[in-house]
Image: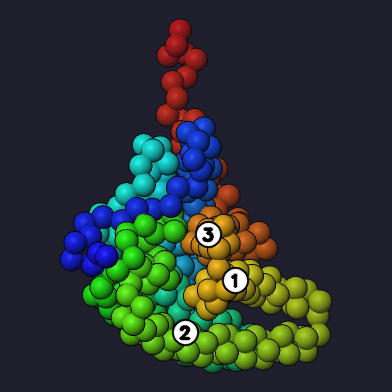
């Protein structure tokens, strides 16, 4: 028997036993991480540098990209280091920090997705009131509320989780520190306190989910009443990417925290965690830029501008001679 006071580090799950497969996993994670960095970095830079994109929708998208970068940067670099150096440990306080920042980014992202649903609802269902309901000050307040609420929830859950006595060793069946996996290490009676915290958070999140669903019901009803096909296509092009991101994030994260122990397995837990912690930050930029011609044009303009500047910095043929 051990308790939390005697644990100085946790052992994270290795994806593979052989060295070759561990290196392959390292390169796979590195590719996904670089894709997330490049994609979200381009979106952040394009929105910040293009004044035409200084609108509420793109302001919230910029915040979403920042949270995506924070979410994947909290887990993947440490996992890559473990794969590359053939280790599996993380310090006790490193694990607590990882839980805090990952839960903060994930929770804030979910609340921000709820705000983005409200933005699309006002833009399509109440366009005449858009400038009033979503002024610059209102957008900043809603974004700050999403960030602040996410950090408060993360702080409460992290403090409560790591105050529990741990009686079942220090091996975490996951490639990063995750609250459900740490609860498996706690004493049988003590973990119920954190379970109640999770239930309250899930109920609050379910309320946000209902708000998103109701908003999109109203949005689709309004879009179907638009007489022109071009108008319907434009409205759908701004809504479908957000709906796809919401569906992927909610389905995987809810399944991770609500699944029963009877259907839990190491391989299933790994797959679900990859889907909600690693995949969305990498594919969100692609989803949002695929159907958004304005954002796609801004990103392309930014990339061609960088490319032309790089060419101008190269020495000319006269200099070579």
Find residue 202 and name its label: 2
At label 2, counting other C-alpha atoms closer than 10 Å, the crowd grade (few under 14, some 14-19, many 20 or more) is: some
| Element type where label 2 sits in the image | helix
Q: Position of residue 277 (x, y in %)?
A: 49, 62
Q: Residue at x 42, y 75 (%)?
A: 107
Position in image of residue 86 (x %, y %): 38, 38
Checking the image for residue 263, the label placed there is 1
Q: Quadrant of the N terminus?
A: bottom left
Residue at label 3?
266
Which type of secondary structure does the marked residue at label 1 adopt? helix
**Relative depth, front residue between 247 and 182:** 182
Q: Nearer the viewer, residue 275 or 15?
A: 15
Task: Residue lying at the far left in this picture: please name it.
Answer: 5
Q: Give the Cα distance between marks 2 and 3.
A: 23 Å
How far across and how far down the image is residue 33, in percent?
A: 47, 48
Q: Residue at x 58, y 49 (%)?
A: 300
In what element is the residue under mark 3?
helix
Viewer-nearest of discs 1 and 2: 1
Question: Residue 159: where, in percent of width, then height?
Answer: 25, 75
Q: Which quarter of the picture shows residue 195? A: bottom left
Q: Is residue 272 left or right of residue 71?
A: right
How are the residues colored? rainbow
Mark toward the start of the polypeptide (1 vs 2):
2
Dot placed on the residue nearer the N-terminal end, 2 or 3: 2
Question: Going 40% across and 70% down the picture, which residue do you hit?
Answer: 184
In the image, 1 versus 300, the foreground residue is 1
Which image quarter is the C terminus in? top left
Say whether marks 2 and 3 touch (CB < 8 Å): no
């Amino acid at each position: 028997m051990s308790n939390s006071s005697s644990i100085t580090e946790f052992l994270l799950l290795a994806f593979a036993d052989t060295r070759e497969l561990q290196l392959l996993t390292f390169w796979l994670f590195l590719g996904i991480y670089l894709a997330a960095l490049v994609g979200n970095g381009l979106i952040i830079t394009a929105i910040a540098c293009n004044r035409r994109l200084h609108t509420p929708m793109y302001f919230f998208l910029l915040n979403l990209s920042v949270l995506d970068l924070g979410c994947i940067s909290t887990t993947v670099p440490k996992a890559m280091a473990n794969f590359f150096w053939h280790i599996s440990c993380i310090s006790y306080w490193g694990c607590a920090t990882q839980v805090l920042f990952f839960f903060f980014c994930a929770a804030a992202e979910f609340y921000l997705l709820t705000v983005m649903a409200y933005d699309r609802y006002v833009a399509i269902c109440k366009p005449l009131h858009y400038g009033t309901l979503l002024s610059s000050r209102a957008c900043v307040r809603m974004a700050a509320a999403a960030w602040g609420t996410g950090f408060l929830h993360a702080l409460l859950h992290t403090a409560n989780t790591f105050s529990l006595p741990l009686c079942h060793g220090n091996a975490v069946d996951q490639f990063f520190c995750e609250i459900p996996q740490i609860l498996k290490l706690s004493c049988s009676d003590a973990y119920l306190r954190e379970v109640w915290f999770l239930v309250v958070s899930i109920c609050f999140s379910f309320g946000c989910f209902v708000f998103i669903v109701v908003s999109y019901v109203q949005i689709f009803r309004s879009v179907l009443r638009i007489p022109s096909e071009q108008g319907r296509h434009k409205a759908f092009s701004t809504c479908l990417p957000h709906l796809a991101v919401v569906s992927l994030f909610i389905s995987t994260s809810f399944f991770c925290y609500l699944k029963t122990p009877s259907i839990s397995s190491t391989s299933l837990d790994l797959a679900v965690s990859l889907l909600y912690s690693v995949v969305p930050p990498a594919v969100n930029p692609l989803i949002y830029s695929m159907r958004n011609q304005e954002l796609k044009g801004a990103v392309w303009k930014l990339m061609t501008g960088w490319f032309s500047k790089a060419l101008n910095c190269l020495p000319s043929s006269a200099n070579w001679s």
